[in-house]
Amino acid sequence: MDAAQMVRGVPLSTLCPKFLHTNSTSHTWPFSAIAELIDNAYDPDVNAKQIWIDKTQIKDMECLTFMDNGNGLSSDMMHMMLSFGYSDKKAVNGKHPIGMYGNGFKSGSMRLGQDAIVLSKSKNDLCVGMLSQTYLKKIGAKQITVPIISIKKPEAKHFSVMEEHLASLRDILDHSPFNTEEELLTELRAIESSCSSTGTRIIIWNLRRTTAGNMEFDFNTDRYDIRIPSDVLKSTTEPNQRPGRQDYSVPESEYSLRAYCSVLYMKPRMQINIRGQKVRTQLISKSLAHIAREMYKPFFVKQKIPITFGYNTKSKEHYGLMMYHKNRLIKAYDRVGCQLNASNKQGIGVIGVIECNFLEPTHNKQDFDNTDKYRNTIRNVATKLEEYCKEIRFKRKNSNRSNNVPIEEEEKRPDQNWAQCDKCQQWRRMPDGINNDKLPEEWFCYMNPDPQFRRCETMEEPEDSDSEQPTNPKTYKIQEKEEKKKQEEMKEFKKFQEEKRQRELLLKAESLRRLKEEREWRKMTSTPNTPQTPGKGASASGVSTSSSQPVITAVFSLLTPSRRKRLQPTTPQNEAKRQKLDGLKRKLVTDMSPSSSTTPPTPVPYKDLNIDDNLLEGSSTPAPTEPTLHPVGVRTESDPKVPVYGMAFSHAALEARSTGNYAMEEMRDKCTQMQGPRVKDEEEMNSSTAANDGAKVMEEGMISIIQAQEEQDQLMELLQSVSNERDSFKEKVKELHKQLELEKQCADCQTAREKAEKLSREKEALLETHSRHNQEHAKHFEDLTCRLERSSNEVKQLEEEKATISAECEKNKSSLTELKNKMADLLNCTK
């Protein structure tokens, strides 16, 4: 290695020629290398209006050529372009440069071929530069050298250069396809063929080939396109391929340069021509169907970022995010969110367009740096994409319920049509109904049907602003909330119905249990009590029954002392004034097993009967809230130690036991249930009179129970009639629901008719507008016809005048000839 160059005694870093190939490997996809060269022409420092990409053959070598009609390069700018890492591009008139690393031309050109020559013509300079790996190998260079010349005084076949550029000129002529000055001048003059006095022309030769020796590009399948063969496409890393995506359909933009250039810029401002034919660029955000606009506000930027969603009108197989950076496409058809699920049809055919100027692209401009900002952006955009799909399906379902064709399967047309003028490169919006595919190949502003934008001098029609552009309303969310609310209400209603049904079943079970107990009680009390003599199971001072019958031994009240009062002795008059038991309200229920008296039954409170007082007609006394039950202590002779609970139904027994006992509180109801202490001793029974009174009380209780049973049967019948009436009401409610549904359907039909009338009126308005425009066009055409006729008449008059003048000239010539002859004769005569 030669001695290193020094600056202030410090050696400079150098670049090995092998770095040219190493640097080019960043472009695994050939079209990304071509895009770098297109970006250089698009950037504001060059500001080309047109670029031509072609394949040519120079001295039996296949070459790629790139020519633009931009501002051109000076020799200094040429040197910076052929060096590494120099980029001083700045925004001009709001147009931001795409290049930022100062590496695009080197990596892109060396990816396409081994050698490249650049010829540029600016206002004040003609210069030529060469970047060649073959040249560096032949001269055995240890560092990258770039021959550059600045041409002075160009002539037809020769030109002159400065003395310091003579070595560069010799190297260019020796190691490039152009071996004479005349050939270089010919290529420089080709720039002027672009109808511009300035521009740049790049020629790349020794194009890359496959391991089989074939060209990396296919120039034969389509004579107006440059394609990548399928075997080469499979060997390259496809920019949008993701693991596990077996359903992935390769978009045309991945193997067709024409298709790729049509979407390369979000809003194209430069005309691209490939192999002699113009690329029909797309305004991608306006060429979709069912367009909706969302706003995304990352926390790390100040302004909201617009996101446009819509359906692809060309192929439902090609969908995903189109992610741009400074108007340049970085990632195409990148599927996110619900689109990654192959089994889920949601999101199929949907394209999202977003300009991510807040993210950092990789140096080959085919992806973004995988940072937190990028991941958050993808996650939020995926959420908004799913919301858009749900909203579109919801609207479609509500607008046309009879249409069963999925929205992904139906044929679609763009919501708007835009055309680009080939002269001023401005975009003009076309009226509805015009098919862009039927427009002429070359379209200019004066062809615009809208007279307001029929001149190139008129500013471009603004796109919908943020305030005018409606965002995507989430009507499906409102519907989901309503449905969720209805489901919760239905769930609560079902729960209430189930609880009600369980309560009814419990009440029925309780009623059956009571009925069974009453029947057992009747059987048990059907045999009259027979007192026994002392010595046969009973003491001399008590009252006894048979072994299976209870014996009433004592009655006590457990009421508080403050409410106790002594009962008056029972008289026949008092007995005559006693009220009759009032049906079911006078019934006191207790559990008593006829077979065994060992387990005390549980008294049932009155409120658990769940009986409505309004249903009990003929009741003379209002029902108590809950009667007080006082079980009476009894026992059987067979087991004197085990107490059981019985009932007392009259005041006679209480009066018979007035000595040593407290009086019970007189109740509203004549049927009173008492509670007493345990049976203490059989010796406490003083006389058989108490036993007789107890038997009498039992008989009266049985009569009351029978009456209560009859009233209960009546009540059950009444409840059954109420249940039947409830069922009839349910049927009526169902019929009312059906009528309501029919009325709702009628209302929907009325709404549909109103919409149809509205659409009809809009159609008539559009037809009137169209007819008015046609009239204006016809009038304009008539004016032009009249002008043309006047012009033709004037031309005829001028031609007639010309013929007259010509005849006069001929006459004058002949008279002049005669005069000349006469003068000659006179002169001869004088001589």
Image (cartoon, rainbow, N blue to C red):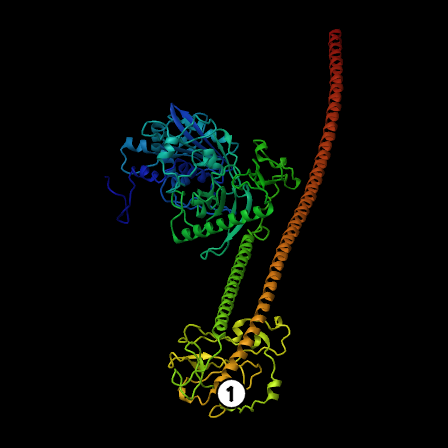
Q: Name the residue under label 1.
A: 654
Quick check: can you spot residue 720?
yes
Q: In which quarter of the image is the N terminus?
A: top left
- Work out whether residue 275 or residue 3 is closer to the camera in this orientation and state it: 275
What amino acid is found at the position of numbered circle 1 in the picture?
Leu
The one nearer the camera, 502 or 181, is 502
In the displayed structure, 489 sits above or below 95; it is: below
On screen, residue 427 above or below 228: below
Residue 429 horizontal side relative to residue 373, left or right = right
Residue 371 is situated, as x and y percent measured from the top left of the image, at 38, 52
Can residue 163 be seen here? The reply is no
Where in the figure is residue 694, as x and y percent of width and height?
Answer: 49, 83
Pick the quarter of the image with the C terminus.
top right
- The image quadrant that residue 176 belongs to is top left
Q: Locate residue 232 relative to residue 42 in the image: left or right.
A: left
Q: Which residue does the image show at 55% across and 51% down from the upper left?
A: 472
- Is residue 550 or residue 148 the one in the foreground? 550
The residue nearer to you, when weighing 776 against 385, is 385
Mark 1: give few (<14), some (14-19) or many (20+) Cα within 10 Å: many
- Considering only vertical position in the picture, is 352 above or below 68? below
Residue 602 place in picture, x, y as percent: 45, 75
Q: Is mark 1 on a helix, strand or loop?
A: helix
Count of number-bearing discs: 1
Residue 827, compared with residue 368, is above or below; it is above
**Residue at 63% in and 78% down:** 620
Residue appearing at x 54%, y 83% in the figure = 650
Q: Horizontal and vertical percent for residue 732?
A: 64, 57
